Amino acid sequence: MKFQTKELQGGLFVRGLEDSWYWSKDGGTYDKNVNFFSIHWEIQFRFLNIVRCHVESPRYKDDPALNDIKSRLVSSIIGCTDIEKTVISRDHEYDVGRRISEKEMQRNKSTEPFKIILKANQVDPDPQKDIENIHELLFAIMDRIIDKYRNGLDSFFGNRR
């Protein structure tokens, strides 16, 4: 897993990127709003107890096909009860995320299907450790969901295998 620390409008945050959950071609990135697709974990420094799952693609007006994949993937993630059950089994809180309506997903590059709220005694001083722990906890479930969309993404971005 790769980690990036960035500052955006909401302040400083750390992002954990699983290589197999990131697609890009022709120099595409989030900032350029073209030819990228990403699923990653994120912790904002002002809310160290919240691990957010983010799915990102270009806005619908810029790339309807990738935005549609994002919409379908987010719906699959939200509809997977195994995620919530697994989170709760570890004594964490599960909450539905932000920008999950069809209109919001089309209008925004970033969608947050869910977030995990850690209790004070569960928060590691190093946010990367919390991301690693949540990733380990949910990787198999999330990867199974992502697999349903992997062929379409590999086809668009060029097969990476």
Image (cartoon, grey):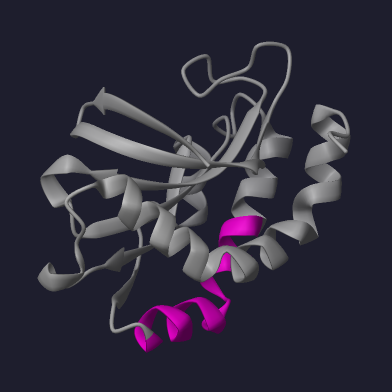
In this rendering, position of residue 65 left or right of residue 77: right
Q: Quadrant of the C terminus?
A: top right
Q: Is residue 96 magenta?
A: no
The percent coordinates of residue 153 (x first, y second) are 78, 41
User: What is the total number of numbered labels drawn onto the structure image?
Assistant: 0
Q: In which quadrant of the rendered view does residue 148 lie? A: bottom right
Residue at 63% across, 40% down: 67
Residue at 29% across, 77% down: 92
In this rendering, position of residue 51 left or right of residue 33: left
Closer-to-camera residue (126/67): 126
Which span is picked out in magenta? Answer: 73-89
Q: Is residue 31 above or below residue 80?
A: above
Q: Is residue 114 above or below residue 152?
A: below
Residue at 46% across, 57% down: 101
Q: Is residue 75 magenta?
A: yes
The percent coordinates of residue 107 (x first, y second) are 46, 37
Residue at 32% across, 66% down: 116
The percent coordinates of residue 12 (x first, y second) are 20, 31
Say if residue 51 shows up in the picture: yes
Q: Main secondary structure of the magenta part?
A: helix
In this rendering, position of residue 151 left or right of residue 1: right
Q: Is residue 114 above or below residue 95?
A: above
Q: In which quadrant of the rendered view does residue 22 lie? A: top right
Closer-to-camera residue (112/48): 48
Say if residue 98 shows up in the picture: no
The percent coordinates of residue 20 (x first, y second) are 68, 43
Closer-to-camera residue (4/64): 4
